[in-house]
């Protein structure tokens, strides 16, 4: 199940239709989901805030696409994966990588930690 959920996490949410993000997020993460970014623990609470952060990040790029490089690897309720993103930022092609760690619960992912390169730096 976690592999399918990670596929939905990456391909439906991060690569999906921007106008459906809230609905998609509610189908992938739990209502009490907490998302943690480097230097910003607890940045996101719940599916709607997750959808807003995804939308905000995607608006910085044109043609942004994510693909899995390693994994997903699941042990117990944890799923880890390494991804590659490619897009266009301020008129220049760019790519950046990151690592996801997600905790699963009965209603979807409950916690998220990400470590990623800064594509704008």
Image: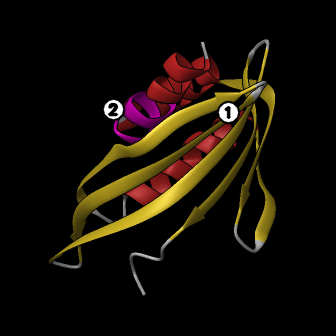
> Vertically, is 46 above or below 118?
above
Q: Which quadrant is the C terminus positioned in?
A: bottom left
- Name the residue at 33% across, 32% down: 17
The image's colour scheme reads: secondary structure
* Residue shown at 42% from the left, 63% from the top: 97
Magenta span: chief secondary structure: helix
The image quarter in which residue 111 lies: top right
Q: Secondary structure at mark 2?
A: loop
In the picture of the structure, the residue carrying the numbered disc 1 is: 47
> Which residues fall within the magenta stretch?
9-15
Of 39 and 20, the residue lying toward us: 39
Whichever of callouts 2 and 1 sits on the residue coming sooner in the sequence is 2
Question: Looking at the figure, which quarter contains the N terminus?
Answer: top right
Q: Is residue 85 shown above or below 22? A: below
Gap between marks 2 and 1, in whole Å?
Answer: 15 Å
Q: Quadrant of residue 43?
A: bottom right
Q: Which residue is mark 2?
A: 17
């Amino acid at each position: 199940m976690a592999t399918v959920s990670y596929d939905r996490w990456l391909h439906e949410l991060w690569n999906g239709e921007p106008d459906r993000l809230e609905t998609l997020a509610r189908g992938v993460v739990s209502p009490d989901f907490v998302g943690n970014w480097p230097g910003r623990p607890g940045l996101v609470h719940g599916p709607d805030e997750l959808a807003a952060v995804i939308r905000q990040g995607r608006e910085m790029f044109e043609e942004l696409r994510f693909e899995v490089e390693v994994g997903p690897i699941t042990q117990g309720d944890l799923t880890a994966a390494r991804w590659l993103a490619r897009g266009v930022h301020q008129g220049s092609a760019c790519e950046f990588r990151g690592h996801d760690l997600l905790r699963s619960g009965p209603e979807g992912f409950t916690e998220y930690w990400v470590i990623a390169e800064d594509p704008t730096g």
